[in-house]
Amino acid sequence: MRQRPEIGAIDTMIGFPLVDLRGSYREMLGQIRDQQTHEEFEMPVEYMFKGVPEKGYGESGDRDPVLYTLSEMDRWGVDVGLVSVGKGDAADAAVARFPERFVGSFAPNPNEGVEAIRKIRAAHDSYGLRALTFFPAGFSPQVPIDHRLMYPIYSVCVELGLPVFVTAGIAGPRVPSACQHVELVEQVLYDFPELTFVLRHGAEPWADLAIKLMVKWPNLHYSTSAFSPRYYPKAVIDYANSRGADRLIYGGYFPMGLSLERIMTEMGDVPLRDDVWPGFLRDNAARVLGIDHR
């Protein structure tokens, strides 16, 4: 195994341990019909991960969740984390207490119509947002990537200069995935040429299509969130090593499904060229998020 590069990373998907892990997925569980998910899982995608870091936190809930995540970041070379704010939880506290280490994203619900726009503007004023995030299959009802309900929000992203991170590919929870097909992204990119769009969670099994679209559309990027490095799609790595070095963005999944220890230990085996690593771990995210990180 090669030594992982010593680059202060920007993690575009990181969070904080919760005492009530299952409770945090209550809204999502309402649309899941699978019996095993309801009876056996604490998180809807538990079947996909082994040793979920967050599951053991309930036994030691007296720890400060912000300091816990910060200590893991320091241990494994993560300088800045993008966290989901606006829910009155640890993420809000982290951005307030450690603004040099945590920056905020916001996840509006397009089903709320104009109220979603009001919430975006309020969150931007309160937290200095760096991005918006969407999980199309997680809404109830689901909202496809190119749905008309998404368009006012994309417009606000362009107005405020915010990138949008959108889960694409087969959904992890046992719900339909058609609303996340990668082909839906192209219409959005055509209609919003100024929008910076980042694919989250692998885009599989349409990673090859994602690459074709990145070649075509200059504002489309790919984040590695929710994937252990050993499972990064080969086609994506090959693209980054050729003409796509500025499109690959690091995203983890701590503590939701992966430990930073596992991610960074496996990272040394990812066959990226030496000159691609700074962009992947830090510079591309800094540019997209508007972070002065030198």
Image (cartoon, rainbow, N blue to C red):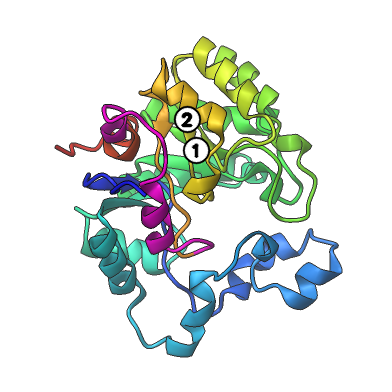
The reply to whether the magenta stretch includes residue 269 is yes
The reply to whether the magenta stretch includes residue 126 is no
Which of discs 2 and 1 lies nearer the camera? The answer is 2
Q: Nearer the viewer, residue 230 or 135?
A: 230
Residue 99 visible in this rendered orientation of the protein: yes
Where, quadrant-wise, is the C terminus in this rendering?
Answer: top left
The amino acid marked with disc number 1 is Phe
Q: Nearer the viewer, residue 166 or 4?
A: 4
Task: Mark 2 and mark 1 in contact? Answer it, CB < 8 Å.
Answer: no
Compared to residue 160, the image places residue 83 above or below, namely: below
Query: What segment carries the magenta color?
Result: 256-279
The residue under label 2 is 237
- Circle 1 — which element? strand
Q: Mark 2 packing: few (<14 Cα in 10 Å), some, or many (20+)?
A: some
Question: In this rendering, would 99 be left or right of 59?
Answer: left
Residue 288, image x, y percentages: 34, 31
The residue under label 1 is 165
Q: How many tags in the picture?
A: 2
